């Protein structure tokens, strides 16, 4: 049933009126309500329904609801939620509420949550769940199916069954549920496992690497193992989708020239918005001052040939645009591992002719534009308008080529220095090209116009 069929009255009505709606639709409507309404609604729900809603990554009020509900109620819900989701919520719940909630959890639950909280935010360990199905490798298919029926409700996913060595408890192999269902009940579960070694990830592996692993091997879940080969959790494909959406959001925001914002746009506080955007704007503004300084160096040329100033926005924006294109392409290629650090020279050799051709195309358009305006009498560029048009055309080739090269190389430099390549935002590249573009522009102008209008 569509979300728009759920009206506001349904939220304020008895919870059972929503039984015919999908949990994602309920979450979407709750996200547009205030915190007080969300808390009252969750508090009135049956526990299993409340757990299902709180387990949804898209529920924006989750942390606040956990803080506002009675501590015993929140802890009870956490006991039945997926461990990775609980860990995510506790990361953002401030003290002393966080400690209070953790102290109310069962010792086993608390130990698992504490372990998840020790892993870096972007690692496989931070998004894995400890609620998976594992059985001894010497069990039969029938024993495994019986066990699945018993534990299904307490596991995040049962689509992958992890086989452990009966003695050492190390991970031996992985069996998909489909293979289990169609197998002979009397057969050994190990006999229906793949012949190759299981695909595993380290807890400190980057979540992007795990996502690529899931895509490459068409997996439903990746087991996370420690250095001894024991499975400590699994990263499921749905958790990876949520993680990748967050990762892509972060990259897009950084490429736009701002710090990553975790909250949905309408939930961001005013001061938080200023904090996340103001810093980068100040840095870019200070950088653009270099453009002013560069123009001051050529102030004499501008006084002699005011007509050159007419084309500064044109040539500068062209260089910034080409640089932003190249930066976006390389950042994405690095993220997908289509190119690696060692490929920087190959990329430069591709961008060099690309920049020249693109600059030549824009240069021809610029020359034609000046010629048309001059011949049609729209604007008089003076007796040396032909040299002026050639100047603009050659300057565009140089600036666009430099923009393409610098825009493609900057992500490599940042990655080599250990920074996120997405930090090479489009505004930052545009600023860099503006400064150097001024130098290129006036150098070409001096070369072609020296002795005439200069």
Image (cartoon, grey):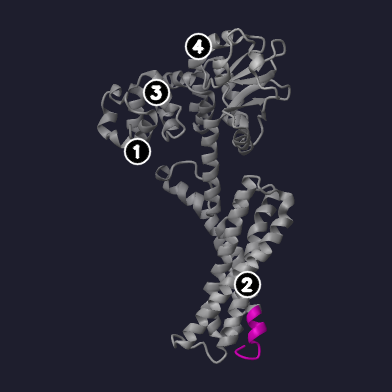
Per the model, the C-alpha gap separating discs 2 and 4 is 68 Å
Identify the mark nearer the N-term, 2 or 3.
3
Nearer to us of marks 2 and 1 is: 2
x 61%, y 39%: residue: 208
Name the disc covering residue 149, or none: 4
Q: CA distance from mark 2 to mark 1?
A: 50 Å
Residue 298, magenta (yes or no): no
Residue that carries the numbered disc 1 in the rendered image: 32
Indicate which disc, 1 or 3, sits on the residue closer to the N terminus: 1
Q: Left or right: where does residue 365 sit relative to residue 269?
A: right
Residue 87 visible in the displayed image? yes
Residue 263 in the figure: left or right of residue 221: left
Q: CA distance from mark 4 to mark 3?
A: 23 Å
**Disc 2 and disc 4 in contact, CB within 8 angstroms:** no
Q: Nearer the viewer, residue 283 or 448?
A: 448
- Residue 397 position, x and y percent, is 63, 72
Residue picked out by circle 3: 50
The percent coordinates of residue 416 (x first, y second) are 71, 50
Question: Where does the magenta region start and end?
Answer: 444-454
In this rendering, is residue 190 above or below 227?
A: above
Question: Which mark's residue is nearer the viewer, 4 or 1?
Answer: 4
Going from N to C along the chain, the mark reached first, 4 or 1, is 1
The image shows residue 326 at horizontal and vertical percentages of 61, 58
Q: CA distance from mark 4 to mark 1?
A: 38 Å
Specify the quadrant that holds the C terminus: bottom right
What kind of element bears circle 3? helix
Q: Around disc 3, counting alpha carbons within 10 Å, would you say few (fewer than 14), some (14 to 19), or many (20 or more)? A: some
Mark 1, secondary structure of its residue: loop
Numbered mark located on residue 397 in the image: 2
């Amino acid at each position: 049933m569509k979300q728009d069929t759920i009206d506001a009255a349904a939220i304020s009505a008895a919870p059972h009126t929503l039984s015919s709606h999908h949990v994602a639709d309920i979450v979407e409507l709750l996200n547009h309500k205030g915190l007080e309404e969300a808390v009252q609604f969750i508090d009135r729900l049956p526990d299993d329904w409340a757990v299902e809603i709180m387990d949804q990554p898209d529920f924006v009020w989750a942390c606040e609801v956990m803080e506002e509900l009675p501590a015993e109620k929140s802890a009870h819900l956490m006991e039945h939620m997926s461990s990775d989701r609980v860990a995510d919520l506790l990361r953002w719940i401030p003290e002393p509420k966080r400690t209070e909630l953790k102290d109310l959890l069962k010792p086993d639950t608390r130990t698992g949550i504490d372990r998840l909280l020790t892993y870096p935010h972007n690692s496989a360990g931070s998004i894995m769940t400890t609620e998976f199905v594992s059985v001894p490798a010497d069990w039969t298919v029938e024993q495994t199916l019986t066990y699945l029926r018993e534990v299904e409700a307490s596991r995040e996913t049962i689509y992958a069954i992890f086989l452990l060595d009966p003695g050492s408890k190390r991970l031996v192999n992985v069996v998909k549920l489909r293979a289990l269902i169609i197998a002979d009940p009397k057969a050994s579960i190990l006999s229906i496992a793949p012949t190759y070694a299981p695909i595993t990830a380290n807890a400190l592996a980057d979540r992007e690497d795990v996502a690529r692993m899931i895509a490459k091997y068409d997996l439903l879940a990746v087991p996370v193992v420690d250095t001894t080969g024991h499975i400590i959790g699994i990263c499921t494909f749905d958790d990876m989708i949520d993680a990748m959406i967050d990762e892509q959001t972060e990259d897009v925001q950084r490429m736009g020239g701002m710090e990553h914002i975790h909250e949905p746009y309408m939930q961001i506080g005013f001061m938080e918005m200023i904090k996340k955007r103001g810093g980068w704007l100040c840095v870019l503004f200070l950088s653009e001052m270099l453009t002013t300084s560069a123009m001051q160096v050529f102030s004499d040329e501008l006084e002699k040939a005011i007509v050159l100033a007419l084309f500064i926005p044109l040539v500068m924006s062209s260089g910034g645009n080409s640089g932003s294109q190249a930066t976006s392409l390389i950042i994405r290629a690095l993220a997908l591992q289509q190119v690696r650090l060692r490929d920087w020279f190959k990329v430069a050799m591709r961008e060099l002719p690309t920049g020249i051709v693109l600059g030549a195309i824009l240069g021809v358009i610029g020359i034609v534009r000046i010629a048309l305006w001059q011949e049609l009498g729209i604007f008089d560029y003076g007796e040396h308008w032909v040299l002026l048009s050639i100047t603009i055309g050659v300057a565009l080739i140089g600036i666009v080529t430099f923009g393409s090269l610098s825009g493609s190389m900057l992500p490599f430099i940042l990655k080599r220095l250990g920074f996120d390549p997405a930090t090479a935002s489009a505004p930052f590249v545009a600023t860099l090209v503006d400064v150097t573009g001024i130098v290129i522009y006036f150098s070409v102008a001096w070369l072609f116009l020296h002795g005439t209008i200069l």
